């Protein structure tokens, strides 16, 4: 994987684009596309349970559902605890509730929404790692997730009757849209290192520019939600972004079973925490977070 120069900044967000790597050698469809095409249905289990949903994939290609992506509907909105490569058939998804004040059904099938902001995803990555070590399950700390959303709503001046994370995106859509306009997708990028408020916060990449182009808007909007409650901070030099990449290379790697196909590799230590989904030896998706 190579480097692009310091790409752009807006407000408290600075983006460093990543280029290179293997490109599109694995056939799959993204969750948004599969749901819209009617090839993927996500619904509650027969006996609804907060930490699990059921994905039914009718397409011959696996569906890629990324950690942090929000599912809207059901008995409560949820967010994925881990990236899942869902094959044809049924897959149980590990999720967390991101709408504390509702427990009644509003839609049989979930629709797709935004992605969780980086601060919450970082916390969940650590929580899921602890759960994997203790029980082998992709479980988060639900109380901590709700507390984070409450704090984010307070920090961004958003009021929500049900405590739904998605209400932040709706209430602050104009401010978030300004970040999208200022930070468009850079051609050829397969990922990005994100700095918010003068601090490196995350490194995320996928297996092809085609996929990254489709995910770029979600990445920017989620980063914007975190940035809305941060001052701009000092400029972030590209050398610090390079060090983030080196930290990931020198971290420890732990292998766990995934709910779908492929391998769930947890990246731990050396100042980073996160995970990568591998399939046939290729990193399909990786999301790592800086631990300061």
Image (tube, helix red, strand yellow):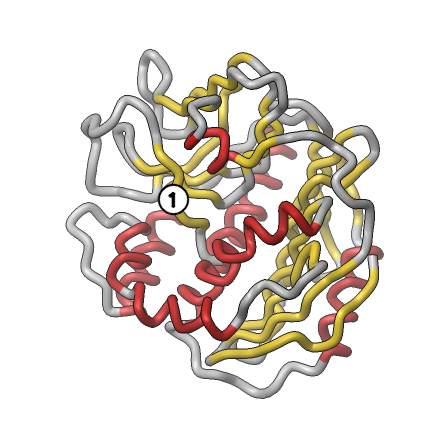
Q: Say which residue appears at 31% left-offset and 50% top-offset.
A: 166
Q: Position of residue 233 (x, y in %)?
A: 52, 85
The residue carrying pointer 1 sits among few (fewer than 14), some (14 to 19) or many (20 or more) residues within 10 Å by Cα, namely some
Q: Say which residue appears at 32% left-offset and 62% top-offset.
A: 151
Relative to 170, say whether 56 is above or below: above
Q: Which residue is mark 1?
A: 113
Residue 41 located left or right of residue 13: left
Relative to 125, say whether 1 is above or below: below
Residue 163 located left or right of residue 128: left
Q: Position of residue 86 (x, y in %)?
A: 58, 24
Q: Say which residue appears at 45% left-offset and 57% top-offset.
A: 117
Q: Position of residue 207 (x, y in %)?
A: 73, 44
Q: Say which residue appears at 46% left-offset and 67% top-offset.
A: 180
Residue 199 located left or right of residue 38: right
Relative to 109, say whether 3 is above or below: below
Q: Residue furthest bottom?
A: 234
| Quarter of the image with the C terminus in it | bottom right
Residue 275 located left or right of residue 109: right
| Quarter of the image with the N terminus in it | bottom right
Q: Position of residue 49 (x, y in %)?
A: 35, 23
Query: How many circles with numbers are drawn on the protein?
Result: 1
Q: Secondary structure at mark 1?
A: strand
Query: 175 or 234: nearer the eye?
Result: 175
């Amino acid at each position: 994987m190579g480097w692009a120069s310091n790409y752009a900044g807006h407000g408290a967000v600075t983006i460093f684009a990543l280029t290179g790597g293997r490109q599109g050698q694995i056939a799959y469809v993204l969750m948004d596309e599969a749901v819209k095409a009617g090839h993927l249905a996500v619904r509650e289990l027969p006996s609804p349970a907060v930490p699990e949903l059921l994905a039914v994939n009718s397409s011959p290609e696996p569906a890629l559902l990324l950690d942090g992506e929000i599912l809207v509907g059901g008995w409560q909105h949820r967010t994925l605890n881990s990236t899942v490569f869902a094959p044809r058939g049924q897959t149980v998804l590990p999720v967390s509730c991101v709408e504390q004040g509702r427990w009644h059904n509003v839609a049989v099938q979930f629709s797709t929404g935004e992605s969780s902001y980086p601060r919450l995803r970082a916390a969940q990555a650590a929580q899921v790692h602890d759960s994997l070590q203790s029980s082998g399950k992709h479980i988060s700390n639900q109380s901590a997730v709700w507390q984070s959303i409450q704090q984010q709503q307070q920090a961004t001046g958003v009021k929500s009757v049900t405590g739904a994370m998605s209400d932040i995106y709706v209430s602050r859509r104009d401010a978030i849209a300004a970040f999208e306009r200022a930070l468009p997708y850079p051609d050829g990028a397969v990922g990005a290192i994100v700095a918010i408020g003068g601090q490196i916060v995350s490194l995320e990449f996928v297996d092809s520019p085609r996929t990254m182009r489709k995910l770029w808007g979600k990445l920017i909007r989620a980063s914007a939600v975190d940035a809305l409650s941060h001052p701009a901070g000092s400029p972030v030099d590209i050398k610090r972004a390079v060090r983030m990449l080196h930290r990931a290379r020198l971290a420890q790697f732990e292998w766990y079973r995934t709910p779908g196909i492929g391998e769930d590799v947890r990246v731990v230590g050396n100042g980073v925490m996160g995970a990568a989904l591998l399939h046939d030896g290729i990193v399909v998706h990786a999301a790592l977070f800086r631990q300061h």
